[in-house]
Every structure is written in structure tokens, then in C-alpha cells.
């Protein structure tokens, strides 16, 4: 089977910068996308360890110190390993990191429920009673990641060996390795040619000429991954299942209010954006498919989530993250709405007497090269939060953690609920100057629908556990 990794676009790590020289434009198209397109950080750093270390027991989890058959440690740790593998591979620039996280956690979930069926399986529906659950989960995770990241096999083999060393040799361990290989193969086969690998730097898109039409945002003369809107979702029936309604009319009061807000609080030199708002604009700037799995790791550990529940939760969260991107991309390209950068500079063309143009306006943070409406960052945050609320049975799960894009003055942020985190996640895009308020609000609404649908329709509890 041909692995998708041979078709990846590799992007060199880069610090966020505003280089605008002619010689730097071509380089910027590649090197800045890790931070600008998906809001992530291209560099693999030691930050991830410090982020998850904020959870009380994860140090023990990642140390593999005698895990039990009911501990979530193996699921939490392989989520971290998947993050590191995706970061090493392409810095989360493409959508492959989100895809591979979901595939890995689905394989782990299916393996556990082949041993003791508690929830509906997704891709693999066999049984393997008596297999060791920790070894099966680790083997499933390993085999998926080796398939999609073959260049990292040595590192992944070492991670698996460390986990297998915690499990006694014997028939249960042998059976677990066979089971892990089977569940990994099932999800890999199911996702073959699913539309994730696309031309990231589309040359077919031609901007419209009317006010409100998306225009390229310097220095990027393209839209990012146009064909990803046709990718196959994990849990939704189609990319357009929950397509959002149109944005406000350019002539409306609602548009003018959103225009004035982002023009003020999202400007590079804003005097109305507070220090804390600047802090969380940066803190949430990393990709949602990086930040929200970390939230799952921190809370699964702090709440001592049991293994089967944790495996299901991570699988559903990562399915929701991927599908939120697909649904968001569908709506973005369907409505093709301009970004604040373009709108504010061309405010005298929108037909709204309430909007005042500023031809020199710049956003606080860089604008990704894709349409404004809706904010997919907001879709992903709300989608993941919806799954987490349902998985824990409550919204009130306090947590603290840091971020790969946090400013040194504000490395850690704390939240009382998942909804509070999702709301700040969305609001950060207005403070960054890269989305209108109506785009973030509609993004949250779309995300809640995606998360609720996936949680209701996949991996449901079985009536009788065996």
C-alpha cells in the first residue's frame, strides 16, 4: 500500500515574521504557513512537555511507570507522540496531522472494544477477548503512525518498545500485537484516498471583482488548499451537511458593527485592545488541532479518566477537529468572503455609509491565505469543546496549560469550563484582526453542530457490555 507521507509538503520551521522583500516572498509562501495558515507553530520544541506537565499525573504517564489495564496513560501518551510526529513531519501545515491523529485514536478505540466491547467500533469490528489492552492500544497507535510517517519508524518503534516493556510477556501480549496491527490496517484502508492530500497552494482560484469577494492577502498570491473542501469527513455525512447561512449584507448595520470592532481592536497599533486580549490573541494563535488535543490530554489526566472512556473521547475529539476543518472549508469557499485586511482598506467601496476606509490598516497578527467566513479556528474549538462536554458529562472541568504561541509574559492560561475556552479561542481571532465577529460566532455555531453530531452518531455505548 502506498503511504500518504510520500506526498506530503514539507515546510521548514520558521519564526513568525513580516518580511515583505521581493526575494522573501517565495520563501514566505512556504516557511510562514506553519504559523499563518492554521495558526500553528512549525517548530518541534520542548514546550509540549511543559504544557502537559501541568496535568498532575502525566509525568508518570509519559514515564510508562507500570500502567494499569484501566489507566488512560497509554492513550494520553500516544496523543503526545502523534503531536511530535506530525510536528516533525510538516509542522502541522497540511491537514494531515489532524487526519493522522484521528486515525490513530480510532485504531486504539477499536482495539480496546475488540477486547471488551463497551462502545461501537468504527473501522474494525472483530473481537480478541483476552488480549492485553495496554499493549493492544499501544500497538494500534504505533502501527498507524508508522504507516503514515515511515521516516520516523525508529523513534516510533522505541516508543512502542517502552510501552510493551510494561506488559508481561505471554499469550495476552502476543494477541494484543496482532489485534493492534489489525485495527490499524482497518482505519488506514478506510481512509485511503480520502482527499486530505491536496494541492496546498492552489493556482486555480481566481478572486472575484465585487466588494465582499475574497482577495489575496499579501504576501500570499493564492488560497490555501482549495480542494480540501471536498475531503471525506470522518463523522459527518458530507462536507456541506451543516453549511452556514450567508454572512451579513455589506450594507447592513450588523456588518458595520463588526467592521468597526475589528478595525479598532484588531489593528496592529490598536489603543483599544487590552494587554490581556493581546495575550490571548497570541496564546490561541497555534492550530486548534494542536491545542485542543492538549486540552484533552490535560483534562483526561487531571480527571483520571478510565481507559475505554479516554480512548473514545480522544477519537471523537480528533474526528470533530478534522471534520470541523472540512465543514469550515466548504462554507469558506462557498461564501468566498473577504478578510478584514481587504475590507477595511476598501471600506469606501462596500456601499455602507457607516464604514470608513483606512487604506493603510494592518491586522495585529498575520492573516492566513483563505477566506474569512466562517472562522475555522472557531469551528474547531467549539466542535472539540462540544465533544469534551459530552464525554465528561459536564462542561465544568477546570484546567490550566500553556501554548506553543504564547507570549513570554503570559505562558499559562486557566479555564473553568470547555465553553469558556472555546469562547476565548474564537474571540482571539477578532483581537488578532483576522476575522469579523460574525465569522467567529457562526464558526462556533457550526462547530457545536459538528461536535454534537459526531458524539451522537459514533462510538455509542453498547446496551450490554461484555
Image (cartoon, rainbow, N blue to C red):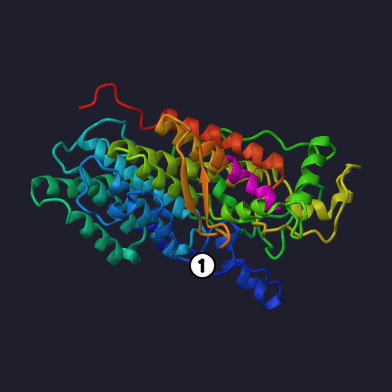
Q: Residue at x 74, y 59 (%)?
A: 268
**Residue 195 visible to the viewer:** no
Q: Nearer the viewer, residue 58 or 426?
A: 58
Magenta span: chief secondary structure: helix
Please count the marks in the image.
1
- Magenta segment boundaries in residue numbering: 423-434
Left or right: 45, with 423 as reference point: left
Q: Position of residue 119 (x, y in %)?
A: 30, 31
Q: Residue at x 57, y 57 (%)?
A: 410
Left or right: 178, with 154 as reference point: left
Q: Position of residue 296 (x, y in %)?
A: 42, 44
Left or right: 70, with 415 as reference point: left
Q: Nearer the viewer, residue 343 or 76?
A: 76
> Relative to residue 212, is residue 82 depicted above or below?
below
Quarter location, residue 116: top left
Q: Position of residue 107 (x, y in %)?
A: 31, 44
Q: Residue at x 50, y 53 (%)?
A: 95
The residue where tag 1 is placed is 11
Residue 107 highlighted magenta (yes or no)? no
Q: Nearer the viewer, residue 250 or 421?
A: 421
- Image quarter where the C terminus lies is top left
Q: Residue furthest bottom?
A: 23
Q: Position of residue 193 (x, y in %)?
A: 43, 50
Amino acid at each position: 500500500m502506498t503511504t500518504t507521507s510520500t506526498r506530503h509538503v514539507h515546510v521548514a520551521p520558521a519564526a513568525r515574521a513580516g518580511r515583505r522583500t521581493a526575494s522573501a516572498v517565495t520563501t514566505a509562501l512556504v516557511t510562514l504557513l506553519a504559523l499563518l495558515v492554521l495558526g500553528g507553530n512549525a517548530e518541534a520544541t520542548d514546550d509540549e512537555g511543559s504544557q502537559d506537565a501541568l496535568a498532575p499525573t502525566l509525568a508518570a504517564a509519559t514515564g510508562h511507570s507500570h500502567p494499569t489495564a484501566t489507566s488512560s496513560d497509554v492513550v494520553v501518551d500516544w496523543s503526545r507522540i502523534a503531536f511530535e510526529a506530525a510536528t516533525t513531519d510538516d509542522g502541522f501545515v497540511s491537514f494531515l496531522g489532524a487526519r493522522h491523529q484521528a486515525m490513530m485514536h480510532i485504531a486504539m478505540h477499536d482495539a480496546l472494544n475488540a477486547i471488551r466491547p463497551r462502545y461501537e467500533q468504527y473501522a474494525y469490528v472483530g473481537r480478541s477477548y483476552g488480549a492485553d489492552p495496554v499493549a493492544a492500544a499501544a500497538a494500534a497507535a504505533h502501527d498507524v503512525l508508522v504507516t503514515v510517517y515511515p521516516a520516523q519508524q525508529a523513534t516510533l518503534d522505541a516508543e512502542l518498545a517502552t510501552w510493551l516493556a510494561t506488559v508481561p510477556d505471554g499469550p495476552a501480549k502476543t494477541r494484543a500485537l496482532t489485534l493492534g496491527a489489525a485495527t490499524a490496517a482497518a482505519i488506514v484502508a478506510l481512509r485511503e484516498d480520502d482527499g486530505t492530500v491536496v494541492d496546498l497552494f492552489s493556482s486555480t482560484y481566481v478572486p472575484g471583482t465585487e466588494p465582499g469577494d475574497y482577495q489575496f492577502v499579501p504576501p500570499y498570491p493564492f488560497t490555501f488548499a482549495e480542494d480540501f473542501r471536498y475531503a471525506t469527513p470522518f463523522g459527518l455525512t458530507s462536507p456541506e451537511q451543516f453549511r452556514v447561512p450567508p454572512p451579513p449584507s455589506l450594507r447592513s448595520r450588523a456588518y458595520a458593527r463588526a467592521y468597526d470592532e475589528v478595525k479598532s481592536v484588531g489593528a496592529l497599533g490598536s489603543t483599544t485592545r487590552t494587554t490581556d486580549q493581546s495575550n490571548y490573541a497570541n496564546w490561541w494563535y497555534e492550530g486548534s488541532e494542536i491545542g485542543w488535543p492538549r486540552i484533552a490530554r490535560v483534562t483526561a489526566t487531571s480527571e483520571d479518566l478510565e481507559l475505554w472512556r479516554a480512548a473514545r473521547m480522544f477519537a471523537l475529539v480528533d474526528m470533530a477537529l478534522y471534520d470541523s476543518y472540512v465543514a469550515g472549508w466548504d462554507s469558506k469557499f462557498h461564501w468566498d468572503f473577504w478578510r478584514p485586511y481587504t475590507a477595511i482598506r476598501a471600506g469606501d467601496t462596500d456601499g455602507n455609509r457607516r464604514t470608513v476606509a483606512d487604506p493603510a490598516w494592518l491586522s495585529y497578527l498575520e492573516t492566513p491565505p483563505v477566506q474569512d467566513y466562517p472562522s475555522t479556528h472557531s469551528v474547531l474549538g467549539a466542535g472539540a469543546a462540544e465533544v469534551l462536554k459530552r464525554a465528561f458529562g459536564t462542561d465544568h472541568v477546570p484546567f490550566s496549560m500553556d501554548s506553543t504561541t504564547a507570549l513570554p509574559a503570559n505562558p499559562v492560561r486557566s479555564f473553568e469550563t470547555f465553553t469558556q475556552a472555546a469562547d476565548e479561542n474564537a474571540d482571539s481571532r477578532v483581537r488578532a484582526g483576522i476575522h469579523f465577529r460574525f465569522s467567529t460566532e457562526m464558526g462556533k455555531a457550526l462547530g457545536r453542530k459538528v461536535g454534537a453530531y459526531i458524539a451522537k452518531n459514533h462510538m455509542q455505548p453498547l446496551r450490554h457490555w461484555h
